[in-house]
Image (cartoon, rainbow, N blue to C red):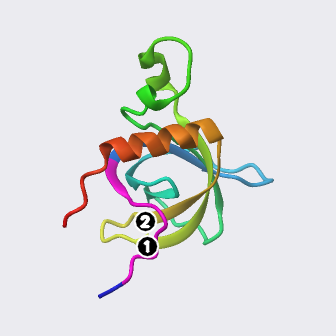
Amino acid sequence: MSQERRQYRRIPLEASLSFQELSFHKGEAPAMTSYRDVSAGGLLVESPRAFPLGTLLKLELRVPGWGRFRNHFGPVQDAEVRPLVALGMVVRVEQLDTGGYELGVKFQNVYPDDLEALVKFLEATAPSPSL
């Protein structure tokens, strides 16, 4: 039996994502794609191209339903439209049969209030563990 090495439990959630490599030279425009699952530690991203391990990415995630867990002023729907912005590092790259890539991205830096809201959202939406 394999042992789970992840610190955080993954939640299946498919939503849109914008990401762009952080670099000192002029890079490509941000890519619009989706992610397949998310945890408090990172996410699984579909990508049209591979990135070397260790590549830093600026991420803007749409997290449907997380607005009610955020500390904010104003209507909840205003909180829903604001993306979670984070810095992530590519820790796994796998080529898919479709020709695209699957990237395992570990969060490196997330605004503390956003991370707290994400954790609360994930805890509230996580399926109950099987006994």
Three-letter code for the amino acid on which mark 1 is drawn = Glu
Residue tagged by mark 2? Answer: 101
The C terminus, quarter of image: bottom left
The N terminus, quarter of image: bottom left
Q: Which residues are magenta?
A: 3-13
In the image, residue 113 sits, relative to residue 41, either above or below, namely above
Q: Is 57 on the left or on the right of 11, as rendered?
A: right
Question: Disc 1 on helix, strand or loop?
Answer: strand
Q: Say which label, 2 or 1, has the lower sequence index.
A: 1
Please name the residue shown 33% across and 47% down the image: 14
Q: Residues within 10 Å of mark 1 (few under 14, many from 20)?
A: few
Q: Is 44 on the left or on the right of 2, as rendered?
A: right
For this orientation, the residue located farthest to the bottom is 1
In the image, residue 21 sits, relative to residue 86, either above or below, namely below
Instruction: Name the foreground residue: 71 vs 95.
Output: 71
For this orientation, the residue located farthest to the left is 131
User: Where's residue 19, x and y in %?
Assistant: 56, 47
User: Where's residue 63, x and y in %?
Assistant: 42, 38
Q: Residues within 10 Å of mark 2 (few under 14, many from 20)?
A: some
User: Where's residue 7, x and y in %?
Assistant: 49, 66
Q: Is 5 on the left or on the right of 128, as rendered?
A: right
